[in-house]
Amino acid sequence: MEFSNFLKLKKILNKRILILGETGSGKTRLTIEIVKFLCSHGYSKDITIIDMAPERMHGIGGRIKDFLTKPLPVRYLTPPNIYPPRTLGKNREEVIKYAYLNYMALKPIIAQFIKNSTRILVVNDLTIYLHAGPLEDILECFKCSETVIANAYYGTRLIDDHGSGISKREKELVKAIFTCMDWVVLLSKEGIKLLKSAESEGNAKQR
């Protein structure tokens, strides 16, 4: 699938889109392109970005602002510090500690959005929250918006979590999100693959 065919308002608005991929696959860049597209059509004031990503380290991760030369004209929510647990953690305890610190930093931001939501929600690096946070918080966020665009890590490069269990947990919870999405898009070296299509399956089953 060519992404140019996907950049159409009818395929984005009132849909829930999940973008998956390995590290460096272009998840964040693709998310930015969708946001820019929506902004170009006058939806800037309707968009909130919740950026859960850590700063870029060794070519891994990166907040949306790390990929931009100038800020996007949208509401942008992110905590001062987010840690990459599997990159920084040297043992099981440290990985769990960083995952918990991220959860505690992001929880009030999620609560802030639920209290004051916008029509369009964009989440960068959803998996950071799922390392230690409950899936229910994410689903509650999704329910607050008509349109959701989120990206999440889905691969094997970061599978070593020093026995903390966060890799298994994130994969299970990401898969659980599939059922409430309209589009599930997997990025790889071969291009863009649709794991779930709104056109073939109709609207997402759970709202």
Image (spheres, rainbow, N blue to C red):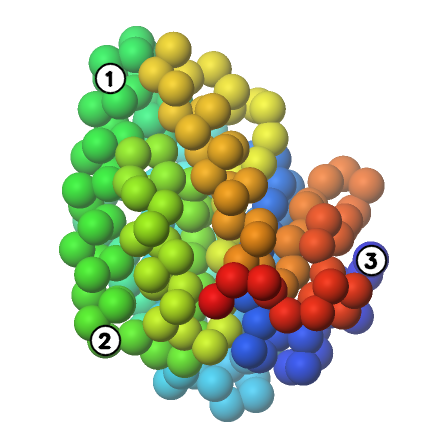
Q: How would you rate the neighbour count of disc 1 (Cα within 10 Å): few for under 14, some for 14-19, many for 20 or more?
A: some
Residue 1 tag number = 3
What's the amino acid at mark 2?
A: Asn
Q: Residue 181: image x %, image y %? A: 57, 59
Evaluate whether residue 24 shows in this view: no
Q: Nearer the viewer, residue 63 or 192?
A: 192
Q: Above or below — where is 27 with respect to 103?
A: below
Looking at the rendering, which quadrant does residue 199 occupy? bottom right
Work out whether mark 3 precedes mark 2 in sequence or the reverse, and give the earlier one. Answer: 3
Q: Tell me which residue sits at (19%, 45%) in the image.
A: 105
Residue 116 tag number = 2
What's the amino acid at mark 1?
A: Glu
Looking at the rendering, which quadrant does residue 162 occupy? top left
Q: Tell me which residue sits at (49%, 57%) in the image.
A: 150
Q: Are marks 3 and 1 in contact (CB under 8 Å)?
A: no
Report how far apart the C-alphas of labels 3 and 2 lie in the structure.
35 Å
Q: Tell me which residue sits at (25%, 68%) in the image.
A: 114
